[in-house]
Image (spheres, rainbow, N blue to C red):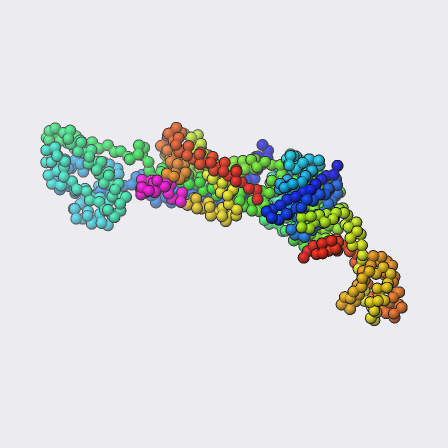
Amino acid sequence: MRQFLKFVGASLKMTYREKIALFWMFLFPLVLMLLLGTIFGHNSQTNVALGVVDRDNSNVTKAITAQLGKISAFKIQNGSESALKQKLMDGKVNAILVLNQGFEASIFQHKPGDATIYVDKSSPTVSQITSTALDQVMGEIGVGMAKQVMPNVIGPNDIIKVTEKSVTSTDMRYVDFVVPGILAMTLMTSGLLGLSLSLVQNREKGILRRVKVSPLPLSRFLGSEITAALIMSLIQAAILLLVGWAVFRIHIKGNWLYIAFIVILGAAAFLAMGFLIASVTKTLKTAEMASNAITFPMMFLSGVFFPLAILPGFLVVVAKCLPLYYLGDALRKVMIQGKSLANVWLDILVVAGVGIVCFIAAVKLFRWE
Amino acid sequence: MPAIQVTDLTKKYDELTAVDEISFHVEDREIFGILGPNGAGKTTTLEMIETLREPDSGQILVEGLDVRKDAKKIKEMIGVQLQTTVFFDNLTVHETIDLFGSFYSKQLTPDELLKRVGLEEKRDSKLNELSGGQHKRVSIALALVNDPRIVFLDEPTTGLDPQVRRNIWEIVEALRDAEKTVIITSHYIEEAEHLCDRVAIMDLGKIVTIGSPTELIDRYSPESNISFRLSREVSHDILARIPGVTDVHDTNGGYVLTTGTPQETLVGIFTAAYENDAVADEISMRRATLEDVFLKITGKRIRA
């Protein structure tokens, strides 16, 4: 135990004195979080600037316009059709809803009202989000209309009731999405790079041989290094979440023990992967290259920065083959959506499985020199 | 019981036989040297005894314990200085010794060890701030951290300048006073002659001979070389008749006589000079060294 604590202490001390490593472990993820959070998350939601042209100018269309205005996702702009179309082309408006003449009359005949939606197809994500949202809203308006019997009792609040619903069950903002993602990414990079590089370096320098001629068993040597790395991971997670909370007020709904469990599980799995890299590579250079070859694709393809939904189909398949996706998913669900460990059993299984397989392979392939 | 008993030890790397059926023993509390050129198999032999490498065949007993069966016990009672060791860059000298000490069940304090190797003033320096000689001294301190009975020093002075080398010799001599058994490898002849009670000379994986330095010189190369100048030329025949002389040759402007009985020959040189109206000058005598022994046995020099 005395050996163990001393070694863990020495490892932490060495990491603390390695200023470049500290930058990558702590400052880099923080900067990344602050940047992404500020650029993409300054409003609570992606707002859609919606131009509305009411050609029918009837009670029903006025009611619809008013109801649309109550949905916080839409920023309603009024104006002439031509002016709005110009704004659409300039990107100042995301979509235009034109309620055509005879809208009210059609509704009263229990036919769908005639409306046109203009979107800018050159920015596909925005136009897709907008038209989906509008479709949904208009659909609900239609249902509300159909229930109406008498035209003369129509008042603005009677015709339609629009309830705002977010696509996910809880209201998730971009920062809420991205902070768990960055945490997952950080656990991956420090796990992969931290242990593998120091092990390979210590082997190259002959330090491992010096340890081997002492009675210290391999398991205790590695155990101490892994413990020190896990402690660093927990500190990283704590700092990220603290800053995320202080700056962006991210909603952490999850149980702290669950979060810590997922953080340690993820860190351990990627440490095992780093250990495997250290076992199969010979020099510091190849270890670095191997780590980068693993971290970079995972960083961009695992949906840690952006939802998988915006990726093309085949990349979604790729993402689901990468362990980082599962770690990000588990952290997000447990932290932000407040789910329990049972809800993310698949994520836990995949991450733990990858870790165990890597660890067994690494121990089998480990070399002292 | 000898401190170390090695019997028929062999180690092969692919085609190369690095160590070829060697046998020797190291007495308790002696300083035992393994001398030989690079690639002779010195380090491989040492590392097999240190439990770092698995022998292909043969037996090694350390204090009566078999390295194959009792590696852990052996590790507790030996101290090892490896040929190339670089330490953790971000720890201080004191922290490094303290850390390695914690690997053993018995541990001397870092300050005591630093005093023994004369590095007290570098206590709080980082390892990457030290000179080559200071580095070696830290690695010797690490070899002593568990107060071992047997200390292995693998080329402790290679690459150091003569002054620093002498400092290291003093540390090794202090180990003799501390009643440690020391095994040291070297390719410096003076080092082996100066420090070792007994020396094993290795070449191409085999031990060519073992004995104390004077014993070996007496056995293989008992002659001394006497070189001198004469004020006028004297024929080789005359010089060859001087008592004890076994060989005569010229060096630039002078002569070198090889003799097994130097005292007798010295007198003879003066007599011959006197009889031939010459004055002998710049006389110097060089006794054979282990280098000559090595040359005699293997036909080559240790440091080619």
Q: How many marks?
A: 0
Query: Based on the displayed image, in which of its 4 quarters is residue A141 positioned?
Result: top left
Spot occupied by residue A7 in the image (x, y as percentages of width and height): 57, 37
Q: What stretch is highlighted in magenta?
A: A297-319
For image coordinates 80% across by 56% down, the residue present is B223
Q: Is the magenta stretch mostly helix, strand or loop?
A: helix
Query: Based on the displayed image, in which of its 4 quarters is residue A78 positioned?
Result: top left
Which quarter of the rendering shows the C terminus of chain B? bottom right
Q: Is residue A319 visible?
A: yes
Spot occupied by residue A347 in the image (x, y as percentages of width and height): 40, 33
For image coordinates 72% across by 56% down, the residue present is B299
A74 to B304, vertically: above or below: above
Spot occupied by residue B243 in the image (x, y as percentages of width and height): 87, 61
**A15 left or right, relative to B299:** left
Q: Is residue B114 visible?
A: no
Residue B82 forms part of the magenta stretch:
no
Q: Identify which residue, A157 or A32, lies in the foreground.
A: A32
**A349 left or right, relative to B281:** left
A331 to A122, vertically: above or below: above
For image coordinates 33% across by 36% down, the residue present is A172
Spot occupied by residue B258 in the image (x, y as percentages of width and height): 81, 60
**B253 left or right, relative to A73:** right
Q: Identify which residue, B262 or B167, lies in the foreground.
A: B262
For image coordinates 43% across by 35% down, the residue present is A351
Query: Based on the displayed image, in which of its 4 quarters is residue B226 positioned?
Result: bottom right
